Amino acid sequence: MLYKKTVTLFAAAACAALCLAGCGKEQEPEPIVQPEVVETVEPEQVIDDTEGEDEEPDETVITERVVKDGKIQSYLTGQWVSTEQAQRRPIAVMIPNNKPAMPQYGLSRAAIIYEAPVEGRITRLMGVFEEFDDLERIGPVRSSRDYYVYVAMGYEAIYCNWGLAVPYVEELINRPNYYNVSAAVVGIHNPADEAFGRFSRPGYATEFTGYLKIDGLFKAVDRLGYDWNYDDAYVPPFLFAADNVTAEYEDKESATMIYPGGKTGNNASGYGAYHPYFEYHEDDHLYYRYQDGEEQIDELDGNQLTFSNVVFQYCHGEVRDDHDYLSFGVHGEGDAIVFTNGKVIKGKWERYDGDFTPAKFYDEDGNEIVFNQGKTWICNIWDEYSEYVEYGTE
């Protein structure tokens, strides 16, 4: 019988206090030097403040990753996946989240889902996938905004989109050291139409019939000469609890219902239009996603979307122009709340080391927050509308 160990975790990574970076600020990335795939990969280690050479290694969090029976623990979920999938770049796919596009196809396979407001004051999703080889398609696929591109850069993902806000995305997405697989539209200098196609959806608008074709994706990456290997300076986005360990946070506030845009009434936060929320189930330690009063499901299998962790990442936002195009500061730092195991861990996020490193999450004492193994949903919360956030027990 497998013995499940539960402990309260306190990682000890230091948190620097620096000034908030400017909204939507572009940074010149360093050229990527691609590594060889190796059998053992060491991510950022947990720092131990104590001294002495005879200390026991920290077995409560994942540190060194070692291949076992052709599998290795994922950088994105902490769970065991095939070595080939875990050690290659993920793909980041732009997916609409408004009611006329529902349901999405393949979204349950995403290791991370990033949700952020767009013009019209609705939200759009970006799914970060590492397990997708057996899928026919993912989608529908929608257009790019620059803050999604910057977030995808942090995961070293191959970014997949159909359309873009040309004034704010064209220069960024066409940089020679950035990997994108984009449909042929104005503003894309090196399109990859072999990766996209229309699928029949009777009753749906044409804009919600375009999908990323997985076989075409592999062909496009090969033709474009992209390297699937992570950069040798790759930084994993999360610190995960080890196998058979639960990050319990027993001293923290409990919350079983989470509303990024509040429970009632419309508001311009981006989350006010379709009223998404998450419900925590203690029996399986998962957060179940709802939207517009219904379960949010994946058309692939008909199952509701579930996650081990939910994150509110607060960002400074601005309205750019008459088209209501938005800008969000996804570099620098800001407040953050991590929901895991039914608990509320308040703290901050930081991202100061360039475009090709992700945001990292720290508690109020400056320790890196330990995530429970599994999928994570990150909500970009516009600072100006943070008053609408609600969570608690019901």
Image: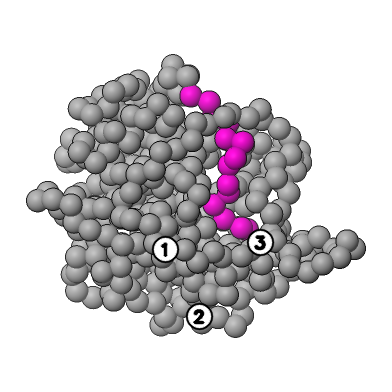
For the residues marked 3 and 1, what is the alpha-carbon distance in whole angstroms?
A: 30 Å
Q: Which of the 4 image quadrants contains residue 379?
A: bottom left
The residue at the point 40 percent across, 54 percent down is 331
The residue at the point 21 percent across, 36 percent down is 166
The residue at the point 48 percent across, 74 percent down is 346
Q: Quadrant of the N terminus?
A: bottom right
For the residues marked 2 and 3, what is the alpha-carbon distance in whole angstroms?
A: 19 Å
The residue that label 2 is drawn on is 254
The residue that label 1 is drawn on is 19
Rendered position, 213 above or below 155: above
Judge by depth and name the residue closer to the eye, 227 or 26.
26
The residue that label 3 is drawn on is 241
**Model colouring:** one colour
Do we see residue 294 in this rendering? no
165 left or right of 380 in image: left
Residue 236 falls inside the magenta stretch: yes
Q: Amino acid at mark 2?
A: Ser
Secondary structure beneath dot 2 equals strand
250 left or right of 269 in image: right
In the image, the segment drawn in magenta is 226-241
Q: Which of the 4 image quadrants contains residue 171?
A: top left
